[in-house]
Image (tube, helix red, strand yellow):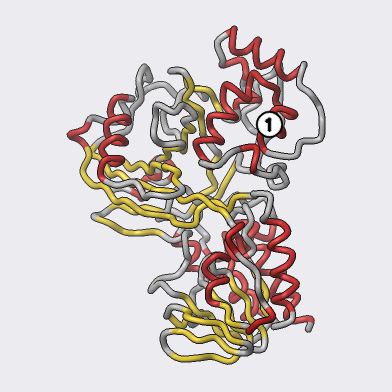
Amino acid sequence: MIVILGAGVTGLSIAYHLRERGEDFILIEKEEGKGGLCRSINSKDYIFDYAGHFLHARSPYVRQLAKKLLPEILSVKRKSFIFLNGRMIPYPIQANLNYLPIFDRLKSIAGYLLRERKEPKNLHDWILANFGKGMANLFFFPYNRKLWRYPLTWITPDFLSPFVPGLSLFQTKEELGYNVEFLYPRKGIGEFTSALGNGIEIFHGEVKQIHEGYVLFEKGSIEYDQLISTIPLPLFWKMLDLGSKVRLKSGCLKWNSVFCLNIGIRGNLSFPGIKSSSMSRESPEGFHWIYFPEERYPFYRVGSFSNVSPLMAPEGHSSLWVEVSYRERRPGKEMIDRIITALSMLNFFKKDSVEHILPLDIQYAYPIYNKGRKEFLSTIEECLENYNISLAGRFGKWKYSYMEESILDGREIAREICKQ
């Protein structure tokens, strides 16, 4: 029997594609719902996701699948910005230098032209080699420090190429990057994962231990011929009981967590100096998300679900999500107060218009590509192969990926299983 652990987007994709091929399997999920972090929560007439999860469907197959599952899924052209020194810069900054003040623009261009082009060994050096000191100090260093909460010189750069757009020095180019256009369900990303898992039987219960040949979970034990885990690797590793043959320490696995504050407000969102009638591309009116690299703001990204789909908030209301990265102590009420104060001072809304807040905690948000990660993964995957156990997905394989990649990974895993 094939056993899949975790009904997030990867686990659901594996199950969906196995079912399409007529293969039997068992899918186990700890939570009562399905979708993992790609699920939506209905709360007081608002719909919130676990931060921003969008389907960046560049693959024709994924686009077709999404439209097959949800014929009315929205196709949205990205509208994102960087808020820097009181100025709104269209994303990505490296392709929109014309929006910078002249001094910052000249420093950015000079830094790029004079950059040292050596093979980078860490994220800090990768930024310098690709963008130079000007843009590094202006945006890339402060933003990445804020996001990762981990020394940039300790992070390897081998995951970055698909996610960081190229550079245009003298011509503004807004349509760069892997997420220029995305698909999004009308009522939250959970509509997609619900449709993907429609009709798939899920056994709900927490996995307690993995022995050679069977899985012990809350409702009993299940024998497996092949086991696929999408559970976050640090958690899964603690569940393994494969005898004295496996003696690896998972302490080298590092990650950051994200505190996501969802906010429902009465009325429309606004922003300083922006008139409601302005529809120009450089105006943040109707923004989807905005990056905040400056340390004076506690959050690194602010987005609006209701700007992507009006059905995410009641009529006449709007909604935001706010992301704060942390690595040790989870933020509490003090952080919520700081966020509300900062956003109201930026004139997103007036404090008395806040109608509802819903804090959500994402314990495993971004796997960190620290120097010990690659060796550990290579060793553990080779070891688990002897027990017919494989890892899958963003957190199972401990990699930085996006929804489309998880869906395609699930399809490929199903194909490989059916060849055996």
- Reply above or below: 420 against 311: below
- Reply above or below: 306 against 208: above
x and y, in percent, of residue 354 in the image: 22, 39
Left or right, residue 46 beside residue 117: left
Query: SS at mark 1?
Result: helix
- Reply above or below: 353 against 229: above
Q: Is residue 172 visible?
A: yes
Left or right, residue 418 beside residue 96: right
Residue at the location (44% across, 28% down)?
295
Left or right, residue 299 beside residue 251: left
Residue at the location (54% across, 51% down)?
366
x and y, in percent, of residue 377 in the image: 69, 63
Q: Residue furthest right?
A: 118
Mark 1 is surrounded, within 10 Å at the Cα level, by few (under 14), some (14 to 19) or many (20 or more) other residues, namely many
Residue at the location (70% across, 17% down)?
111
Left or right, residue 139 beside residue 194: right
Quarter of the image where one finds residue 61: bottom right
Residue nearer the viewer, 397 or 276: 397
x and y, in percent, of residue 73 in the image: 50, 55
Quarter of the image where one finds residue 404: bottom right
All told, the count of numbered labels is 1
| Residue bearing the label numbered 1 | 127
Q: Residue furthest top?
A: 102
Residue at the location (36% across, 17% down)?
273
Q: Residue furthest left?
A: 352
Quarter containing the N terminus: bottom right
Q: Is residue 63 visible?
A: no
x and y, in percent, of residue 19 in the image: 62, 81
Quarter containing the C terminus: bottom right
Q: Amino acid at mark 1?
A: Ile
